[in-house]
């Protein structure tokens, strides 16, 4: 029985590998068709390709402007909060598009194939609202402000209203991750979870309003990420360390904090469902960052990581190699020898290796719902003559 099962399993595995190969081949060709002509992004540090650094004071750069940030791929700090590429960079590569230009990081940048408004430390909720409740925000660049600035900059980005409508309609709009900082603020002040939970419906409705506004501007495809499993986050594990082992799951993550992430994600998915019903012509895809990352924390060796996923690559301090007062990017804080073997980068953000696996899981795997449909080129081949196909390939 066991041997039969494993035989069948091997067959299945090899079959699904060939299917995967065909899919990758198709996807490669599809990217040359450029179904999406650009990426328009809103959010926080998870998708920030240089905005926070661009906005920060020359004499007081954000920490991600210092080594070892950027050491793996770009070989210098770019303002990305990782050792290398982010999920948004892998999406851009996959679509055959350039890395998305940060709007605030490059005033003379080329925004033809994408524009990024995501800013590290940004919240979904308005800064004034949060400050009234005692949470300090370094920049007035909440989600609503990002969308407002996008709207105001349209004449410079795309010219005539009809051209802008086309641009927005042909873009993949990455709406997040956003909301994480709304929760980090109070959680890092050790405010009670019930108090933080009260923010969830407000965060979700802010995300929903931003999507609705972009739909009214012509948006047709949205990728909307949920929250991370913060109970496995090195910063949270350090802050909420406890001798009560019952608070941890078998992987060493704090159960109650992961429950909080799940709570946000359930609410978000319910709202996205509502938006899909209201806008049947719009493709609203939920990106399950939570589970795409959780599996890496739960089975690190399966994905090529060391068997210690809850420890930051770049940091100092026991037991998680993290200390809020001496963070990665500060003088004298080193990174691990091989970041590709670590899931956690600086205690808050992930390594390029983890982000790559998360991006793969969205684009090709089960973590996008509904999943992406990459059949563009194959239908072109079927329906059009070879010249069209050729010009499609030549345009890449
Ligand atoms: C430097 O920037 C950080 C983050 O925005 C801020 O908290 C800090 O007060 C600034 N320091 C100085 C000396 O301006
Ligand atoms: C933030 O910017 C927005 C948009 O420009 C503005 O309406 C709002 O008053 C600003 N909030 C604060 C606290 O400065
Ligand atoms: C973090 O570093 C500070 C200053 O070096 C130290 O006083 C503190 O105990 C450290 N905290 C933890 C959790 O290790
Ligand atoms: C994918 O898109 C193609 C072409 O537009 C369509 O014919 C097909 O039904 C779609 N597949 C799925 C699973 O939605």
Image (cartoon, rainbow, N blue to C red):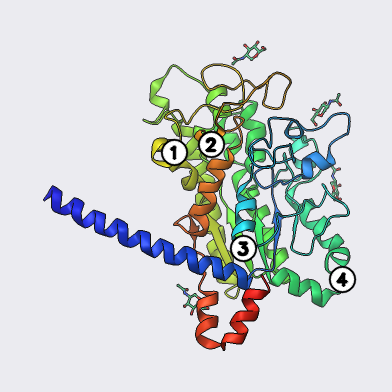
Q: 91 or 116, which is in the foreground?
A: 91
> Alpha carbon of mark 1 to alpha carbon of mark 4: how far?
47 Å
> For this view, does 106 lie left or right of residue 95?
right
Helix, strand or loop under label 3: loop
Q: Position of residue 219 (x, y in %)?
A: 69, 69
Circles 4 and 2: CB atoms closer than 8 Å: no
Decide if ligand 3 comes within 8 Å of the CB at mark 2.
no
Helix, strand or loop under label 2: helix
Circle nearer the viewer, 1 or 4: 1
Looking at the image, how many numbered discs can be counted on the residues?
4
> Alpha carbon of mark 2 to alpha carbon of mark 3: how far?
23 Å
Residue at x-position 61% and y-position 63%: 95
Circles 1 and 4: CB atoms closer than 8 Å: no
Q: Which residue is mark 1?
A: 304
| Mark 3 closeness class: few <14, some 14–19, many ≥20 residues within 10 Å | many
Q: Quadrant of residue 101?
A: bottom right
The image's mark for residue 342 is none
| Mark 1 closeness class: few <14, some 14–19, many ≥20 residues within 10 Å | some
Decide if ligand 4 comes within 8 Å of the CB at mark 3.
no
Which one is earlier in the sequence, the residue at label 2 or at label 3?
3
Q: Which residue is mark 3?
A: 95
> Alpha carbon of mark 3 to alpha carbon of mark 4: how far?
24 Å
Circles 2 and 1: CB atoms closer than 8 Å: yes
Q: Which residue is mark 4?
A: 159
Q: Which residue is mark 2?
A: 340
């Amino acid at each position: 029985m066991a041997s039969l099962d494993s035989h069948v399993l091997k067959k299945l595995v090899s079959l699904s590998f060939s299917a995967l190969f065909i899919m990758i081949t198709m996807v490669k060709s599809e990217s040359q068709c450029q179904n999406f002509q650009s990426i328009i992004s809103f959010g926080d540090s998870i998708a920030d390709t240089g905005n926070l650094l661009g906005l920060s004071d020359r004499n007081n750069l954000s920490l991600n402007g210092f080594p070892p940030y950027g050491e793996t791929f770009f070989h210098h700090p770019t303002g990305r909060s990782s050792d290398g590429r982010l999920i948004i960079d892998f999406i851009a590569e996959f679509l055959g598009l350039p890395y998305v230009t940060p709007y605030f990081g490059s005033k003379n940048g080329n925004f033809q194939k994408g524009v990024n408004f995501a800013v590290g430390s940004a919240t979904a909720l308005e800064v004034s609202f949060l400050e009234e409740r005692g949470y300090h925000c370094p920049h007035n660049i909440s989600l609503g402000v990002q969308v407002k600035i996008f709207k105001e900059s349209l004449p410079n980005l795309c010219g005539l209203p009809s051209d802008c409508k086309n641009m927005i309609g042909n873009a993949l709009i990455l709406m997040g991750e956003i909301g994480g900082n709304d929760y980090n603020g109070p959680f890092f002040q050790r405010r009670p979870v019930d108090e933080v939970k009260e923010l969830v419906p407000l965060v979700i409705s802010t995300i929903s309003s931003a999507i609705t506004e972009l739909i009214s501007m012509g948006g047709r495809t949205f990728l909307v990420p949920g929250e991370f499993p913060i109970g496995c986050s090195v910063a949270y594990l350090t802050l909420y360390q406890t001798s009560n082992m019952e608070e941890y799951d078998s992987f060493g993550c704090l159960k109650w904090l992961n429950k909080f992430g799940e709570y946000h994600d359930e609410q978000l998915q319910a709202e996205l469902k509502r938006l899909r019903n209201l806008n049947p012509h719009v493709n609203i895809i939920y990106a399950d960052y939570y589970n795409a990352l959780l599996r890496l924390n739960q089975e690190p060796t399966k994905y090529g990581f060391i068997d210690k996923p809850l420890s930051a690559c770049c940091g100092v301090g026991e037991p998680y190699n993290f200390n809020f007062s001496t963070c990665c990017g500060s003088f004298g804080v080193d990174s691990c020898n091989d970041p590709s073997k670590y899931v956690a980068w600086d205690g808050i953000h992930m390594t390029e290796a983890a982000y790559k696996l998360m991006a793969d899981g969205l684009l090709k795997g089960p973590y996008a719902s509904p999943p992406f449909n990459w059949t563009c080129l194959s239908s072109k081949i079927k329906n059009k003559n070879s010249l069209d196909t050729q010009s499609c390939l030549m345009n890449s």
